[in-house]
Amino acid sequence: MTGPAAAPLRIVAVHGVGNSFGPEASGTRLEELRALKARAWTRQLTSGLRVAPNRFDLDFAYYADKLVTGPVAQGARDPDFLDDPLEQEMLTAWARELGVPEEVSQGHATVPLRGLSSWVARRFDLAEGPLRVFIQLLFREVAAYLRAEDAPERVAARDEVARRIAGHGPRIVIAHSLGSVVAYEALHAHPELQPELFLTLGSPLALPRAVFERLIPSPQGAGPERRGTRPPGATRWVNIADPGDPVAIPPQLGRFFDGIALDHTTVINPLFGFHHAENYMRSATTAATIAPYLEL
C-alpha cells in the first residue's frame, strides 16, 4: 500500500570520495554528522521521486575515517603530483583508460596533474581547477582502500559498511563512487546480508589495473574473459553511470560483471557535478529504479 501508513523504505547509503568529516570527528559529533548526511541523502532522493521524506528510513554508512593513515604535513604534497607510488600507478591506469596521450600522461618519475587534468577537462567539458583537486582526492582514497587485501584500513572500512547494513536491515543499498567498491566487497564478505537491491552510482568497479583486478573476491577467468559477479543471494544489482563521468570507466559494468540486472548510461549533469552523489540521487533514472520499492 502507498500513503501515510506505508512503512518507510529502509535504505543504507554508502558514500564515495571526499566525504571525510575530519580527524576530530568522533563519538557524539561523528553520529551528529552522520545523521546530517543521512538527512541530506534522503532529501536528494525525495527530490527526484517527489515523495515526502518520511517515506524513507535511510542510514548513512560512514567509512572515510577508516582510510586515514596519518596526518600529512603542510606542504608535504606537491599540488601538481601524486607522490605515492600506488596512487601514481592508479592514476596512470586511469589516464590510459581515458585515452590520454602518452606525452600528456607520462612524466619522468611521476604523472603531472596539470597537463592531465587540463586534457580531461577539455574532453569532458569540465572545470579544470576543481577537477585537478578532485583527481588528487580520488586516487588518495582509492589507494588507501585498495593498497593490500589485508590492509587494516580496507578491513575496517568494509566491516563498518557491513555493520551498518546488518544493523539497519535495508531493502536497498545505494553506493556511490568508491563506496560501490567498499559495499561490493562488504556484501561478498558477508553473504548473510542480502538487500533486495544493490544500486551503484558512478562506479569505478571495472577500472582495469587500478580497481578491477584488486577486488575481493578476485574476478575469475583470464584476459578479456575475466569476470566479476554480483553479490551473493537474490540481491538485484542495478548500475547507473553518466557518460560524462570520467570516474565511472570503463562504461557499462555489465561487460565486466555477471548478474547485473540493469546497466544504465544516462546524463546526470553536464557541468562539474558529473560525479556528485546528489545529482545521481536526484536523477530520473535513480527515481525510476527505486519507485517500485515504494510501490509508486
Image (cartoon, grey):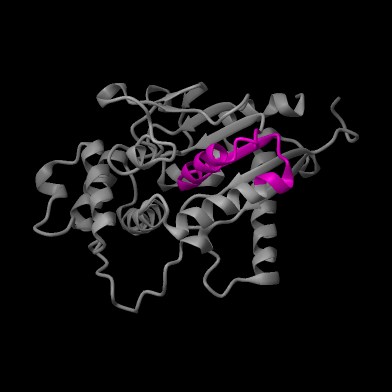
Which range of residues does the magenta coloring cover?
165-194
Q: Is residue 254 left or right of residue 106?
A: right
Q: Is residue 189 magenta?
A: yes
In the image, residue 87 sits, relative to residue 206, either above or below, namely: below
| Front-lying residue, 40 or 259 | 259
* Quadrant hosting residue 12: top right
Residue 43 seen: no
Residue 187 rendering spot, x and y as whole percentages: 57, 38
Which image quadrant: the C terminus?
top right
Q: Is residue 280 visible?
A: yes
With respect to residue 85, does 24 lie above or below?
Answer: below
Q: Residue at x 48, y 24 (%)?
A: 263
Q: Decide if residue 128 is on the left or right side of residue 9.
A: left
Q: Is residue 109 on the magenta stretch?
A: no
Determine whether 294 is above or below 276 in the image.
above
Q: Nearer the viewer, residue 291 or 220?
A: 220
Q: Which residue is farthest right?
A: 5
Quarter where residue 55 is shown: top right
**Residue 205: where, in percent of width, then height?**
41, 37
How many numbered discs?
A: 0
Farthest residue toward the bottom?
A: 74
Up the image or down, 98 lies above or below 139; here it is above
- Residue farthest along the front direction in this orientation: 150
Expressed as whole percent of the image width and height from the top left, the position of residue 3 reads 87, 31
Residue placed most toward the observer, 193 or 130: 193
Residue 266 coordinates in the image, percent (x, y): 46, 28
Quadrant location of the N terminus in the rendered image: top right
- Give the quadrant of residue 13: top right
Tell me the residue at 43%/42% (across/down): 274
Q: Residue at x 42, y 53 (%)?
A: 150
Query: Which residue shows up at 69% across the image and 64% down it?
Result: 31
Q: Is residue 57 left or right of residue 229?
A: right
